[in-house]
């Protein structure tokens, strides 16, 4: 268990140690430019609110001085004059409170607008950029990581951006302003306080850094446990099939306990920090009272000034504490932003739109692979070596051979999911690299693979995915051609049935026929069938095969076949092994040659015999 535990966790460690890209200020500027007025408004409102906050202690002091006057001489002067005395400063304070509240409202609202605009712009740009990335990119990144950047990272970036402007600017203005007003109230007391401040800052920052590291650590443990749970729940069938529920539970429980311990330590640290900070802050209050009282007794200070001083001191302390907390958020936000910007800035090597289109009526569909060599970008080993294949327009060619030989790779290259390293692939004599990939994939080629993906929408829309401007009638025609019409009509709501909803189960064979209809609605000149029937049982295979036999007519078709019985009718069969074509010919030619094809046939017969026993 422990080695299993470690190896699975090691895999999560790998993920957390991604290189952190640089933050791009240019991109931030671009994102904010459209909202610059709102942003300037927000900044000004936040700073004004801070400025007003600075005024409050002074006003409180003024009021206290008046009240104080009446506590000593109250009886003599009376209530009317108290009101007369206090009226003006009280109204002033009231106005200040009102202004403060209005400004707070303004900057929070404005920042919400700027923040949300920025986040939605960022999400749209990132999503668009992701959709355009090369297939190679998706080989190298897990979907979870990408979704994480779209959600968590954008969220982190937005909130830390908002915080920096609102709290950061405010805290800075308030600290500076309050220190100035402290000087104005009592230079002597201020000097004493400023003397102790550095100690507070040094201790506070050190502890803060320590706590942040602890928090990151604890957070890391939690995300590891989440990843474990995600893996187990997401693959529940495998877990169940191996009866590993207990093992998975143990793994998870162990991880949760680890994070619990870390969080308790963190809580202890935070408690210590807060407790210590309170002690220190109260100490400062007491110290100020003591020093202030002494100054009052020497007639160097008024009671109200001491109140002003105390309130302003607390404002400085609070602002500084806020700034130190903010530092963590800023670091986090910059990292998150950099992660988002990185993918926006990644340019795909294969463009989505760019290049020639061949008009439908002049497209013959002749495909030629000439001396193609190819290796996947993630691996150096050649998958295709000097691969040559010519398919005349309208022909059906079957690629057969042991798995791993490179058959699917041929299909991927034809779809231009990757570019070849050497040689070239042409369609009607034109290099694929000069053709518009959107046209090639969207109109010229219909691709049906082993595991078709249906989206959680109606059957109608799933088929229409092949050509968004197709009419309902065209969808139904395509479904008929794909032998799908009759079973679709038996669904609870026919073509309007939403797939993936409870109560609608679609068998593998039905799924495949919907996928065929989807590919057919493009009316593609070229069809690629990549093991389209290999995941099906015999009965479904027969139904799907029937549909396929109908639809390949008049189209250049590349069939990648697992079962040799399905390819007998092909115009010719190419046996692919180790990235090369070893034999080409019709079924009977190859069979009588007693070469690789014959061996494959024998092997399959043996397997079929074993299965049927
Ligand atoms: P076949 O279709 O004949 O089974 P493939 O074309 O799928 O063979 O695979 C040929 C080789 O390329 C195999 O060694 C396989 O591991 C490798 N391969 C396939 N897809 C990828 C990929 N996306 N990244 C890296 N290697 C791959």
Image (cartoon, rainbow, N blue to C red):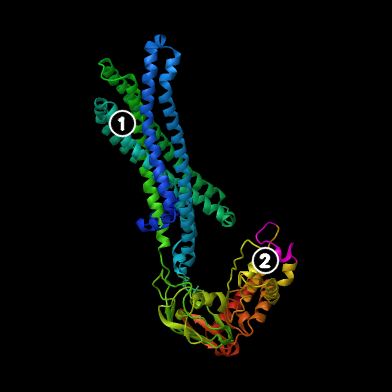
Q: Which SS does the magenta portion mostly show? A: loop
Residue 367, given in percent of the width and then of the height, sits at 52, 85
Near-viewer residue (83 or 163): 83
In the image, residue 217 sits, relative to residue 52, either above or below, namely below
From the image, tell me which residue sits under label 2: 459
Pick the front one: 572 or 272: 272
Residue visible at 65% across and 78% down in the picture: 548
Residue beneath disc 1: 181
> CA separation, marks 1 and 2?
71 Å
Q: Which residues are magenta?
A: 490-502
Q: Determine whether 385 is above or below 343 in the image.
A: below
Indicate the quadrant where residue 535 lies. Answer: bottom right
Dot 1 falls on a residue whose secondary structure is helix
The answer to whether mark 1 and mark 2 are in CB contact below 8 A is no
The quarter in which the C terminus is drawn is bottom right
Q: Is residue 540 left or right of residue 72?
A: right
Q: Height in image: 442 above or below 101?
A: below
Res 384 label: none
Residue 613 seen from this side: no
Quarter-of-image position of residue 561: bottom right
Where does the image place residue 418, in percent across and percent down from the top left?
Answer: 45, 74
The answer to whether residue 476 is magenta is no
Mark 1 or mark 2: name the one nearer the start of the chain. 1
The residue at label 2 has a CB less than 8 Å from ligand 1:
no
Front residue of 62/220: it is: 62
Secondary structure found at label 2: helix
Image location of residue 293, percent across then percent down: 29, 18
Image spot of residue 298 (x, y percent) = 25, 16
Q: Nearer the viewer, residue 225 or 53?
A: 53
| Label 1 environment density (alpha carbons within 10 Å; few <14, some 14–19, many ≥20) | many
Q: Which mark lies nearer to you, 1 or 2? A: 1
Magenta stretch: includes residue 493: yes
């Amino acid at each position: 268990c422990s080695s299993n535990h470690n190896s699975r966790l090691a895999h999560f460690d790998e993920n957390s140690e991604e290189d952190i890209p640089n933050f791009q200020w240019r991109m931030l500027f671009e994102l904010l430019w459209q909202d610059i007025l709102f942003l300037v408004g927000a900044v000004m409102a936040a700073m004004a609110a801070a400025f007003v906050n600075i005024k409050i202690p002074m006003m409180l002091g003024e009021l206290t001085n008046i009240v104080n006057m009446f506590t000593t001489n109250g009886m003599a002067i009376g209530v009317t004059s108290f009101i007369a005395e206090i009226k003006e400063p009280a109204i002033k304070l009231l106005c200040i409170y009102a202004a403060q509240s209005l400004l707070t409202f303004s900057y929070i609202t404005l920042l919400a607008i700027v923040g949300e605009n920025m986040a939605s712009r960022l999400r749209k740009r990132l999503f668009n950029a992701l959709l355009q990335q090369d297939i190679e990119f998706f080989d190298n990144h897990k979907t979870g990581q990408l979704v994480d950047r779209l959600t968590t990272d954008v969220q982190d970036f937005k909130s830390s951006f908002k915080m920096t402007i609102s709290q950061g600017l405010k805290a800075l203005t308030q600290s500076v302003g309050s220190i100035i007003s402290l000087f104005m109230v009592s230079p002597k007391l201020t000097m004493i306080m400023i003397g102790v401040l550095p100690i507070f800052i040094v201790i506070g920052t050190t502890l803060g850094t320590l706590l942040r590291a602890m928090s990151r650590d604890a957070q890391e443990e939690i995300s590891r446990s989440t990843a474990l749970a995600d893996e187990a729940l997401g693959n529940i069938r495998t877990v169940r099939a191996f009866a590993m529920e207990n093992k998975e539970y143990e793994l998870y429980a162990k991880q949760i306990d680890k994070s619990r311990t870390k969080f308790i330590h963190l809580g202890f640290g935070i408690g210590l920090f807060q407790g210590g900070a309170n002690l220190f802050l109260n100490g400062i209050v007491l110290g100020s009272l003591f020093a202030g009282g002494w100054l009052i007794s020497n007639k160097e200070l008024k009671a109200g000034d001491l109140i002003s001083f105390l309130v302003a001191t607390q404002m400085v302390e609070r602002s500084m504490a806020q700034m130190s907390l903010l530092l963590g958020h800023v670091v986090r936000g910059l990292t998150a932003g950099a992660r988002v910007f990185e993918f926006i800035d990644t340019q795909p090597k294969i463009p989505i739109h760019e290049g020639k289109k061949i008009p439908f009526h002049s497209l013959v569909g002749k495909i030629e692979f000439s001396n193609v060599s190819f290796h996947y970008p993630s691996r150096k080993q050649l998958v295709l070596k000097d691969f040559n294949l010519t398919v005349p327009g309208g022909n059906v060619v079957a690629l057969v051979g042991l798995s791993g030989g490179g058959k699917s790779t041929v299909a991927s290259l034809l779809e231009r999911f990757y570019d070849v390293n050497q040689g070239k692939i042409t369609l009607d004599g034109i290099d694929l690299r000069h053709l518009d990939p959107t046209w090639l994939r969207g109109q010229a080629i219909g691709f049906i693979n082993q595991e078709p993906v249906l989206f959680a929408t109606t059957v109608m829309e799933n088929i229409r995915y092949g050509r968004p401007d197709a009419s309902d009638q065209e969808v139904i025609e395509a479904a008929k051609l794909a032998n799908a019409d009759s079973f679709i009509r038996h669904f609870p709501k026919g073509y309007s049935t939403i797939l993936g909803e409870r109560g609608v189960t679609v068998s593998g064979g039905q799924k495949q026929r919907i996928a065929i209809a989807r590919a057919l609605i493009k009316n593609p000149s070229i069809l690629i069938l990549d093991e389209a029937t290999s995941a099906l049982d015999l009965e479904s295979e027969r139904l799907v095969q029937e549909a396929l036999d109908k639809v390949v007519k008049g189209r250049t078709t590349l069939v990648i076949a697992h079962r040799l019985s399905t390819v007998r009718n092909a115009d010719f069969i190419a046996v692919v092994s180790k990235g090369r074509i070893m034999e080409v010919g019709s079924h009977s030619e190859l069979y009588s040659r007693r070469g690789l094809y014959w061996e494959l046939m024998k092997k399959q017969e043996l397997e079929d015999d074993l299965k049927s026993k």
